[in-house]
Amino acid sequence: MNSWLPFLALALPAVLLASPVRAATRPNILVCIADDASWHHFGANGDPVVRTPAFDRVAREGVSFRHAFTSSPSCTPARGALLTGQHFWRLGEAGNLWSRWPNTAPVYPDLLAQAGYRVGLQGKGWGPGDFKFHGRTHNPAGSAVKDFATFLEGTPRGTPFCFWFGSTDPHRLYDRGSGLKAGLRLEDVSVPPFLPDTPAVRSDLLDYYAEIERFDRDIGAMLKVLEARGELDNTLVVITSDNGFPFPRGKATCYDAGTRMPLVIRWPARVPGGRVVDDFVSLTDLAPTFLEAAGLKPPREMTGRSLLPLLTSGKSGLVERRRDRAFFGRERHANVRENDWGYPIRAIRTKDFLYLRNFAPDRWPAGDPPIYGDVDQANDIAGSPSKQAVVEHGGDPAIQRLFELAFGKRPAEELYDLRADLWQMNNVAGDPRYARQLKRLAADLMRELKRTGDPRATGEGDTFDRYHYVSGGTVVRPRGQ
Ligand SMILES: [Ca+2]
């Protein structure tokens, strides 16, 4: 199958009116997206330390998703997938971090703008990368504005809006000791078992929490502005993140700490609140959801499926039985390997299992030694006290296993049984007792990759290693071109 086939559909009219939704009933859409926050680290998701009243309110008065996954645990492809409603592997060069926006796949903010929405962006939109190279004039997430309040003042009454608040919290670097200064306590932290439990790591986690709290305060202020304007209840408010926390075994990995995302949605005008949903959803489902909520038919190249039926159902638990799995993966994150190569992974996650296919197991998954730069920070190990704790004590017998889990090479297949191994630390892919599950999950994954035109499934996967890496005005053209 030609991997470019999905793009041919772009010649068709992008948007068709699906239903006669009157302009007055179309919701405003507000997306609040954190930068590097995992599902686990929000109050409503069970974290006992972090204080997130705005997130908790939206969860309480809306729908809270327990199994939402990013398409890729890396800023650029995650945001591209969310904006296009497509698996990241369908986005060509935008499947990599620090890439160029191909400007071929439609994005929901453009489609809503064409339908009369006012569209704005505050903070980090699609990126990092170069959205202008192939001809765009503004970020795919919207035209940049000063702030939300100013944007609202300039929006006429009766005109629906679509706004993207892209926080840079809780991305590193952190203000060392800021968690302690914010009143958080070392002794309250629960350190995940793949990190060393030391005071330095605990304090690093508190600093991460402090930035999540700032993200939450910013959202609280925005909700207040909407409320004062009388528009809160007809605004579809979404709070989520692009990828998981910037710690070893988190961001840029396909384990839960890298891919399982916070996702709460509040829209009282049509969505009964107070619900926790177990369906497996992808952040690629958001674009078709927004379009459908606005009365538009999602373009057929969107692989995401609208959440609107689920949201309006009023039901909790597993609402749509076929939503029992999520697919995701990664290509090049930071440029930290010989020959400017990435580390290709594809994965399927179900309630009980996580199956990973590593397409190039001869490469270093976290980047070449001694920097292992796919784990923040790429150029400065001391910029991440948790990474430093693992790297600098890798020879210590107590830390050695954690070092291998974070930075060591991995086999072509990994399988984790979440019933016994919540944090996915014991690979059972070689255990004959799991042969049946492994075979089935591998087949299910490959079927989805083929169905959706993934170059990795059609023998053209190396194309991701050949795209330019565009960082800070520097363009790296991989060797052999
Ligand atoms: Ca990010």
Image (cartoon, rainbow, N blue to C red):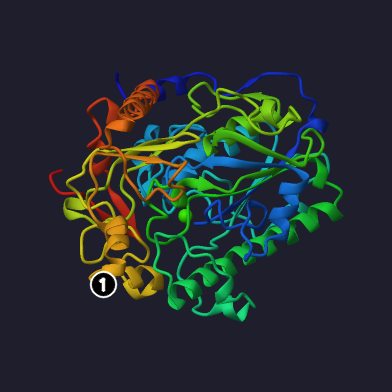
Along the horizontal axis of the image, is 372 left or right of 243? left
Q: Quadrant of residue 431?
A: top left
Compared with 306, 51 (above or below) is: below
Q: Residue furthest left?
A: 480
Given the image, on which type of amino acid does mark 1 rest?
Asp
* In the foreground, 468 or 358: 358
* In the foreground, 388 or 436: 436
Q: How many marks?
A: 1
Residue 322, image x and y in percent?
55, 23
Along the horizontal axis of the image, is 326 left or right of 3? right
Q: Residue at x 39, y 24 (%)?
A: 448
* In the foreground, 136 or 195: 195
Query: Could you say whether the residue bearing mark 1 is in a helix, strand or loop?
Result: loop
Compared with 199, 63 (above or below) is: above
Q: Residue at x 72, y 57 (%)?
A: 54
Would you call the spot at circle 1 few (<14 residues within 10 Å), some (14-19), or many (20 or more)? few
Residue 199, image x and y in percent?
46, 77
Q: Is residue 138 something one can see in this rendering?
A: no
Q: Is residue 266 something one can see in this rendering?
A: yes
- Placement of the C terminus among the 4 image quadrants: top left
Residue 83, image x and y in percent?
53, 39
Along the horizontal axis of the image, is 75 left or right of 121? left
Q: Quadrant of residue 134?
A: top left
* In the foreground, 99 or 195: 195
Would you say the beta carbon of the disc 1 residue lies within 8 angstroms of ligand 1? no
- Placement of the N terminus among the 4 image quadrants: top left
Q: Which residue has dot 1 on it?
A: 396
Residue 9, image x and y in percent?
45, 20
